[in-house]
Image: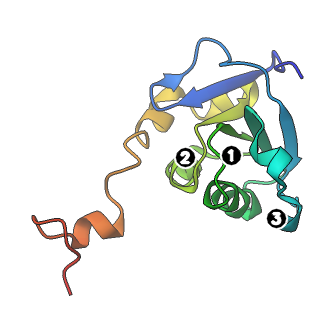
Amino acid sequence: MHEDPMTVIVNDHGFAPEDTGAIAADLQSDFDPKGITAELLKQRSIRITLDSFANGRGFTLATRLRQNGYRGHLRLAGHVLADQYTMARRSGFDDVEIPQDLAARQPESQWLARADWRAHDYQSRLRRPNGRIAT
């Protein structure tokens, strides 16, 4: 498959100047996790497309793929808001692909504000300096 020239790739450094490579498998967010096969887990790259920013199934699917041992490149595509970038990264996505019109409405600065996705989660706020969760 080839990259749509009308999209923008977003990663932890902002808007990427170009795509990182061809996508080997395209899945819709309503893909049944029971369909995760050994062959799918061997794919070099998988893109999961959301049909709506309110659809969280793609995040669950990404988590399931990673839990099942997927180590390749995982991309979230479609109707994704900058506010969802942190959740996307924590769910296992490597980057996000958005339409150019969405990138114009949500400039790079909004995505970069969420690029430090490892910080500010509830677990880091609860951790003691020794790395253990406070109880």
Helix, strand or loop for disc 2 = helix
> Seen in the image, is 84 located left or right of residue 51?
left
Disc with the residue nearer the chain's start (1 vs 2) = 1
The residue indicated by pointer 2 is: 85
Assign the N terminus to one quadrant of the image: top right
Density class for disc 1 (Cα within 10 Å; few <14, some 14-19, many ≥20) is: many
The residue indicated by pointer 3 is: 33
Density class for disc 2 (Cα within 10 Å; few <14, some 14-19, many ≥20) is: many
Disc with the residue nearer the chain's start (3 vs 1) = 3
Q: Can residue 98 be spotted in the picture?
A: yes
Helix, strand or loop for disc 1 = loop
Q: Can residue 50 be spotted in the picture?
A: no
Density class for disc 3 (Cα within 10 Å; few <14, some 14-19, many ≥20) is: few
- Residue at 32% across, 69% down: 123
Mark 2 touches mark 3? (CB < 8 Å)? no
Kindly identify the amino acid type of the residue bearing the numbered disc 3. Answer: Pro
Reply above or below: 12 against 64. above
- Residue at 64% across, 53% down: 69
Q: Nearer the viewer, residue 34 or 121?
A: 34
Q: Position of residue 134 (x, y in %)?
A: 19, 80
Kindly identify the amino acid type of the residue bearing the numbered disc 2. Answer: Tyr
Q: Position of residue 86 (x, y in %)?
A: 49, 50
Mark 1 touches mark 2? (CB < 8 Å)? yes
Helix, strand or loop for disc 3 = helix
Q: Nearer the viewer, residue 110 or 14?
A: 14
Tag shown at residue 80: 1
Q: CA distance from mark 3 to mark 1?
A: 21 Å
Reply above or below: 57 against 66. below
Total labels drawn: 3
Kindly identify the amino acid type of the residue bearing the numbered disc 1. Answer: Val
Q: Quadrant for residue 62, please give it.
A: bottom right
